Image (cartoon, grey):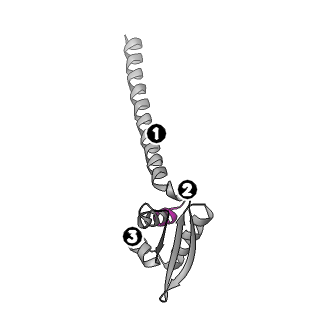
């Protein structure tokens, strides 16, 4: 999942607010997306199509009073999105912590070897 798809999935998950589906407009989604990145309706459509292909959600485009709307139903992967994000973050934190522990252990081992063979 690239950065755009990740941002869109996070916005959709937030807008669905714990339910398995919602009716939202592209402007609703774009209002939650990060301001610094340039998002257009076409880029949003592409991201939603990619997320649908990846099995995160089902999207049906419709119109309500002349405004484009999305009927979004979260699939199992979409419902577990936040949990998966937290798990990925914890995995990265654990890898960094393990690297620090390994570096510290190597430093101590080096000091011990230096003390033994330096005498």
**Front in this rendered view, residue 100 or 7:** 7
Magenta: predominant secondary structure element? helix
User: Is label 3 or label 2 in front?
Assistant: 2
Looking at the image, which residue is at 49% across and 89% down? 66
Task: Check residue 32 in the rendering and tell me which mark sits there, or answer none.
Answer: 3
Image quarter where the C terminus lies is: top left
Extreme-right residue of the structure: 53
User: Is label 3 or label 1 in front?
Assistant: 3
Residue 67, above or below 44: below
User: Is label 2 or label 1 in front?
Assistant: 2
At label 1, counting other C-alpha atoms closer than 10 Å, the crowd grade (few under 14, some 14-19, many 20 or more) is few
Give residue 99's quadrant in the image.
top left
Task: Check residue 77 in the rendering and tell me which mark sits there, or answer none.
Answer: 2
**Rendered location of residue 38, percent (x, y):** 44, 74
Task: Check residue 95 in the rendering and tell me which mark sits there, or answer none.
Answer: 1
Image position of 64 (left or right of 100): right
N-terminal label among 3 and 2: 3
Local secondary structure at mark 2? helix
């Amino acid at each position: 999942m690239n950065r755009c798809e990740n941002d869109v999935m996070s916005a959709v998950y937030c807008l669905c607010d714990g339910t398995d589906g919602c009716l939202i407009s592209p402007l609703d989604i774009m209002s939650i997306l990060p301001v610094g990145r340039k998002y257009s309706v076409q880029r949003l459509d592409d991201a939603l199509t990619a997320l649908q292909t990846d099995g995160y959600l089902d999207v049906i485009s419709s119109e309500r009073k002349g405004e484009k709307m999305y009927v979004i139903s979260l699939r199992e992967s979409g419902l577990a999105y936040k949990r998966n994000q937290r798990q990925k973050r914890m995995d990265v934190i654990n890898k960094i912590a393990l690297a620090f522990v390994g570096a510290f252990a190597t430093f101590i081992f080096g000091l011990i070897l230096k003390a033994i063979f330096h005498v």
